[in-house]
Amino acid sequence: MEKLDLRLLRWMRTHGHSPGIESAAKALGKAGNNGAVWVALGLALAVLDPERRESWLICAALGPVAIVLNYGIKLLVKRPRPVLEGLPPLGGAPSSLSFPSAHALSSFAVATAMFRVDPATAGALVFALAISLCRPYLGMHYPSDVLAGALLGIVLGLIVPLSI
């Protein structure tokens, strides 16, 4: 499994790269930092949809909550970020720990919860996938970090109570 993970990471770091795509991937990564884009989206939906305001506010808070949960898991697992000779990462990170991907966990947690509130937000799941895939593309995570983060995020998004 480890060899496959490394081969897939190397493939993602050496295929489909151009300045424009790399800039877009970096922008997606910044948007996903600390769940910021998900907070903004949840707050916007809370304003636009007062009937479900409480649920949208829970979605907005879920991103940062997922980041904290993710950091606790990182401290337990202690997997270092990938190092590929000749292919340095194309971005920075707040810690040297890699597993699971906080971007994937928070993005899929919120996108899943949003889909539960209103299936018309299915595009959020596509956005979560884009944010997640840019992490190994930029060399910040192994693909398995992203897969684990996405799966944990989906579970969190399915179990979080969406009304108080």
Image (cartoon, helix red, strand yellow):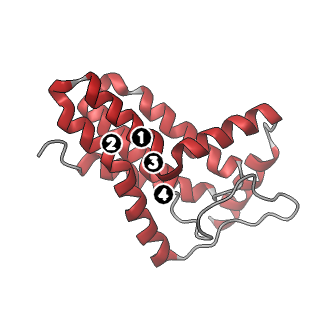
Query: What's the distance in space between the residues labelled 4 and 3, CA to CA?
Result: 17 Å
**Front-lying residue, 12 or 19:** 19
Q: Residue tagged by mark 2?
A: 60
Tell us which disc is closer to us: 4 or 1: 1
**The N terminus lies in which quarter of the figure?**
bottom right
Residue 122 picture quarter: top left
Element assignment for label 3 = helix
Residue 47 drawn above or below residue 67? above
Query: What's the distance in space between the residues labelled 2 and 1, CA to CA?
Result: 6 Å
Q: Residue tagged by mark 4?
A: 148
Q: Earlier in the sequence, mark 4 or mark 2?
A: 2
Identity of the residue furthest to the left in this view? 164
Q: Residue tagged by mark 3?
A: 35
**Contact between labelled residues 1 and 2, with CB atoms less than 8 Å apart:** yes
**Front-lying residue, 97 or 84:** 97
Q: Amino acid at mark 3?
A: Gly
**Contact between labelled residues 1 and 3, with CB atoms less than 8 Å apart:** yes
